Amino acid sequence: MSPPGKPRASSYRYNEKPVYTTSNGAPVENASAWQRVGPMGPLLLQDFHLIDQLAHFDRERIPERVVHAKGAGAYGEFEVTHDISDIATIDMLLGILRSHLQMDPARWIIVYTQIHLKTDQGNKTFTNEEAIKMSAENPDWSTQDLFDAIERREYPSWTVYVQTLTPNQAEKFKWNVFDLTKVWPQKDVPLRPFGKLTLNRNAENYFAEIEQAAFSPSHMVPGVEPSADPVLQARLFSYPDTHRHRLGVNYQQIPVNAPLRAFNPFQRDGAMAVNGNYGANPNYPSTSRPLSYKSVPKAHEVWSGEVVRDLFGEVTPEDYEQATGLWRVLGRTKGQQANFVHNVAIHLSGARQDVRRRTYEMFSRVSKELGQAIAAETEKNVHGSAEMASKL
């Protein structure tokens, strides 16, 4: 059996010498010899080899992801390092504990979680000018860095932590816990380590295994439920719907996306059904083909209320508190506050005056010092550009 996400080995056939044919397997004597009327005449529509090549070339690209279209990818493994069985019923997080752990369904509780992956390699950043230079020299620098590190067996890893709040704690929390513009301060909600993620194998074929990869927050396992975060709620639909658009309705039949042990003949047919379409199995509950069912945790949130049109309400001074804290954190590392001011000013200097003024006011709510610094450097760039333009 092929490793998870890996196409059948027969599609690679590294130990064989390829034979050039048309797409349907007919041999071709010369890959660049096309049918035409005489050595100088027009090409012929009957030349299937040529038309097939052109038609496939026109369709080689698929729609890119709307977000993170420049993403890279690799295979890896997740290791459970700490016992969190008191807050999790997920099989993959229990590991060897499962053999002696007795879970009482009556005691299952809901906890809201935020999961953090912190790099074990440390953090390195480019300045604005370094990033511009690198984007010209090698726009795929980050992708190459990941690929080369894995090839050198210097496998990158991330320590995985979880923060948890009970519904009672969430209700009393200072901020709306479903507002993704806010973090849960670690001094109030400590990080709890529970695992390690390591990337240790590159893809054999970038298009098949990375470009066609289809992740979604709605692809959940038993023991996980979505929170009421409105952005998450929207993505539960939007991500898989994007995959249906990019890859087709049967995108989960693509080897890199195929569930490892699923056998559910109810969802079938549609474009590019290539897995045998479940043969003669009925696609409905049938007494001639009995089904088996598995129990899953049944703890859910309870909601009741009227339908309203609302998100997070008006912006208040509290919305700037965490931004102010982050600005102070940048001040702990020499030069980082100056880099931030410079990066904002470089881009803001191309905006209209009224936009620049409103931006200064916004950053001043974070820190008066920050607003003044951005205003000073931005206007210096604006006047410098105007002076340069007047000399042309």
Image (tube, grey):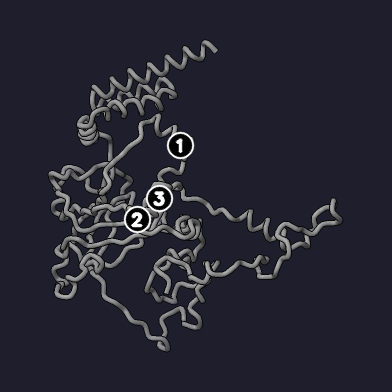
Q: Earlier in the sequence, mark 3 or mark 2?
A: 3
Give the tally of numbered discs.
3
Earlier in the chain: of badge 3 and badge 1, it is 1
Disc 1 element: helix
Q: Which residue is mark 1?
A: 135
**Outermost residue, bottom direction?**
288
The type of residue carrying mark 1 is Ser
Q: Is residue 369 above or below residue 151?
A: above
Q: Is residue 363 above or below residue 117?
A: above
Q: Which secondary structure lies at badge 3?
A: helix
Task: Identify the element where label 2 is drawn.
Answer: loop
On the picture, is 60 further left or further right than 224? Answer: right
Res 29 seen here: yes
- Measured as percent of width and height from the top left, residue 200 is found at 35, 58
Amino acid type of disc 2?
Arg
Residue located beneath label 2 in the image: 153
For the residue marked with disc 3, what is the amino acid?
Asp
- Viewer-side residue, 241 vs 69: 69
Q: Is residue 377 left or right of residue 166?
A: right
Q: Is residue 317 above or below residue 247?
A: above
Q: Which residue is mark 3?
A: 148
